[in-house]
Structure formats: structure tokens, C-alpha cells
Amino acid sequence: MRKLYIAICILTLVGCHSVKKSLTVFDMVHHNPGEAEFETSYNTPEKYIQYGYTGKVFHLFDAAQYGISFELYDKSLYADSDEDKKWIVRKAESISKKYKEFSKAGLEVYCMMDMIVLPKKLVQKYKTEICDGRGKIDIHRPKTQEIIRALINEIFIKFPELSGLVIRTGETYLNDTPFHQGNNPIFNKTHSHIELINLLRDEVCVKRNKKLYYRTWDTDYFHALPKYYLTVTDSVEPHKNLYFSIKHTMVDYWRSAPVNWNEHQLDNMQKYWIDEASMHGIPFNPCIGKGKHKQIVEIQCQREYEGKSAHPNYIANGVINRFTELKGLPGPQCLNDVVNNPNFTGIWTWSRGGGWGGPYIKNDLWNDANTYVLANWAKNPKRPESKIFHDFAATKGLADDDIEKLHQICLLSSEGILHSQYSVYGDVMVVWTRDQGMGGSGALHATLDSIYANNAIDKYLAEKKEGTAIWKNIEELGRSIKTGDMATRNFIATSCTYGRIKFEIFEMGWIVMLKGYAGDKTGVYDFKAMSDAIKRYDALWAEWRELEKRPECPSIYKTGSGGDLGATIDSYRTKCIDAGFNELRNK
């Protein structure tokens, strides 16, 4: 395992580039929709200044659109006594206070807005002019465009602290907005994007000299496939204030080894989403660096599909220097590969949040490591990741020997997650686990079928065993750290154990699912291996529940609902009991 760590360290020193331009560095806390906001130091401007951020992006429910009553557009829309008007006024006061706090600290201020979301009362009044036959707000209608222009006008009058807007399409969250409604405005794929971008470019960039960051995020084509990205962006005239915001991953924040990767294969694809990512892998986003527009790269630091920082998950080195599964691939595969590209202007980290529900953490250590290293890399891309990490760990009061151990933990965590959750061999359903849930054989049916058909069960199970070994090493390292304050040491030790338990549960789950699937196919079950794995699975859950009692421990995963890993285990538990393994009755 020591050799693995040394090899990773050597690779992180490769590719340091000479950079002269000043990079933009934004951050956002993406609070869970419909829940109380996170308690985190990233809610204060002091943290941003300390880490060298240049701007703050407020999340969807602190977007300026929710503080706009359209009084300059239609004075008759609300009476002061209307409950929805009172809500808008309160919201405007709340977000204005937040904007001013960060603006006064010298930071650029942005808000991420869902397009299109409008007050219900306004939609009801103008429905025949702005909605299609399905009742969806239609961006192609003249009245809709008139209203969007009016919205932007009032936003910058009411919130002059805003440096610009970040625009999201595709998904529309209305969890915390009782008096608004909306929908995805992209009715006609590339044509809708082009029309919306040109409208926003005119109102934000040209008329008001404000910045517009248009997110390419969607769930199939614009974000992932260069041919669609270029079709849209080549139809829009560049502007000094116009940027396209792109996740560093080709799809969502997942990992999977690209197998026999050739970017030219994308030319014949109409979409690239969950099935394609599971089958072909997840490289660095191939749209980054292409076209004629400036770009900023989005990076989630508390990965929602990978434990939400309840255990070590260090992605900063992989994003900067290539993840293990991307080494050797052609084309740009990390930030250091694009840092000198004229289109690349900076990064936008999500220090907290993304996804839904838990796990809920009580310490920002692991996501903090990602944000610190990424933000400070952007300040000086010539500095090696290892040097930046050393500076970060020193802020936690660790001695040099323990800084080295913490770095080992972080680098090994990236390898452990790849082997335990995904695969170096690819061909694993990338969304089989997310947030606080674990999918079972239903979510992984295509994966299990492919592994069985290719006679690769032993190969994949050996990889899961290797993943568990990595996490056991991480746990041992976590327990050996002796410097720093007690709270930090306790969290390191507990969260490393948390990771070992979780990923060993994954290993036991894979044993049962693959052995069980083979038995379902052949009628011959390896009941001994399955029953041993189920016994260990039960013991691990008992250990995990006991660990959760520690005050510093994040919340643990949920299981037992229909179709998840617990349900799959119980279905094969019954088969094992029927075969005579009665000790599995008392789980």
C-alpha cells in the first residue's frame, strides 16, 4: 500500500504549467432543497477571503428572482396585503442582506437562477400569452421574452450588489418557493438554448455590462457532447462578459474507467448520460477548451454520489492532475491539461451540498481539503498539489509526520472509492448508490448481467476485496494521527472507520449479488460464500450503528426499502436459510 501512495505522489508532480493569467475562483454552498441550511464556515465571507476566492455564488433559493414582485412591469399584479407579496418582500430583504455582506467584503456576488421560474400570479394573468398547450412557460413566445427582460431589469435595480447571474436550465427546483412555478425552457434542444442565451446576453452582458455564466448542465447532450456544445455556442457571438460553465466530469460527478476510449465515437451519439457513462466510462469533459467562448469549470467538493464527505474523499488531486483511471488517455483529462487554454478562465467549487438528504456531516474537514487545494491551485497553478495540501494540513495544527499521513489518507481515498464503488474495469452502473442510499440487484441488473456474461465475477470481486484493503489501511492511518486538536483527531479516526465499514458493506453486497445472480442463472448457488458474506454484512451494520453514537460521527446510510441493497441481501438470505444456513435467521 505504501508503494501505491508513492506512485500517486510521483504522478501528482507531473504537468505543472507556467501560467500568467489570473484565474477566477468562485464557490457555492448548495443547501439541500426543502431543508434547513447547512451550518458551515462557508456561509461567511471571511472563509472566502482566507482561501483566496474571488466570488460567491448564492444557491438556487437565494436567487434574486424570488425577491422580485414585477412592480415596474405590472403595478396591478399584487396588493401589499397579499401573502405572496409579503413573502417576496421578506425574501428580498433576506437575500439583499446576504449579497451586501459578501459584496462589502470585496467579493463578486452572483446567484444561480433556474430558468424559467416566475410568480404564480404573473403566470396566471398572462398564461394565454406565455404558456403552451401543456401549461408550460414557453421561452419562444414574445410575451415570455418581454417578461424575462423585465425580470432582469428589476433584478439589477433592486440588487445592485450583483456582479452578474449564473443560469441553470434542465432541472427546476421549487421546494422552498410556495408562490412560484416554472419549468425547463428547453423545448427544442439547441434552438431553445441559442434563443435563451442570446436574450440573456443582450440584457445582462450588453445592456448592463454585467457577467453571465450560462451552465451547460443537462442530462443528455449539451453538457457532454462537443458537437451539440459547439452547435449552440458557435451560434452566439462572444462577449467579454459571457462565460459557459461546465462540470469537469463529462456527465455528473461520477467516476468510471473509460474502456477503449475514443472521443471520435461521440460523433455518432445523440446523448451521453447514465447508460452511456456506465458502459463507456467518464473522462474529463470533452467540451472544456473547445469553441470560441470563455469557460469556467465546476467542481463538487462534497460529492453527493460518494458519501458527502462522511469519510475521506479527496478529489482535488484527480481534478488537477488526472484521476488514476484517466492517466494515459488522449486529450485534456484534468485542469493542468487546460490551464493554458485561452478559453479556460477559472473554477467554481461547490464547497458544500448537491443531491438530497444525507449523510449529514458535523465537520467540513474532507470537503475543506478539496476546496482549499483547488482554490489555492487556481491562485498559483505552478505549485504542486502536495505543497498546497501541506499548507492546508498545517492549518489544522498537524505535525509534519501527521501531515504526511493525512495526505496518504486523502490520496488513498480516491483509489479506494474507484475500486470499491466503481471499477477500473468500467461497466458498472454509476448511480447504483447516491446520497444515503445503496442500490441493490435491481439498480445493478445490467452490470451483473454483463459481468456474468463475460465470466468476470472473480475479477470484479477481487477488485472489491482490494478496495476494502485500501480502506483498512486508511482506517489504520486515521487512528495513528496524534497531533492537532482533539475534535479534529476524533473526526479523522471516526470518519476513516466510517469509510472502511461502508465500503466493506459494499464488498459483501457485491459478493452476494454476483454469486446470487450466477445462481439465479445456473440454479447452482455458492451458499457458503453467500452466507459468510451476509453474516459479515450484518456484523458491519451493527458496527456502523454503534459508530453513529459517537458525537462526531456523520449520519449513516439507510437501507431496507424496496429494491435497495438491504432488500437484495434479504432475498438471498431467505435462499441461504432454505438451504440450511439457519444462523442467518437472527440478523
Image (spheres, rainbow, N blue to C red):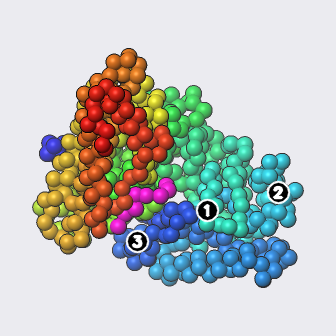
Name the spot of residue 174 as percent of width and height, x first: 64, 61
* Real-space CA distance between mark 2 and mark 3, rounded to the nearest whole angstrom: 40 Å
Say what secondary structure mark 1 lies in. loop
Q: Which residue does the image show at 82% across and 63% down from the upper left? A: 124
Q: In the image shown, does 159 or 17 lie closer to the viewer?
A: 159
Query: Image height check: is 51 above or below 220?
Result: below
* Real-space CA distance between mark 1 and mark 2, rounded to the nearest whole angstrom: 23 Å
- When asked about the image quadrant of residue 391, the answer is bottom left
| Mark 2: amino acid | Ile
Say what secondary structure mark 3 lies in. loop
Q: Which residue does the image show at 50% across and 29% down from the upper left? A: 264
**Residue for badge 1:** 175
Q: Earlier in the sequence, mark 2 or mark 3?
A: 3
Q: Quadrant of the C terminus?
A: top left
**Residue for badge 2:** 130
Q: Which residue does the image show at 49% across and 70% down from the upper left? A: 37
Q: Is residue 483 visible?
A: yes
| Mark 1: amino acid | Asn
Query: Image height check: is 515 above or below 429?
Result: above
Query: In the image, which residues are magenta?
Result: 355-362
356 in the magenta segment: yes
Name the spot of residue 473 as percent of width and height, x first: 18, 48
446 in the magenta segment: no
Q: Which mark is residue 40?
A: 3
Q: In the image shown, does 341 or 446 lie closer to the viewer?
A: 446
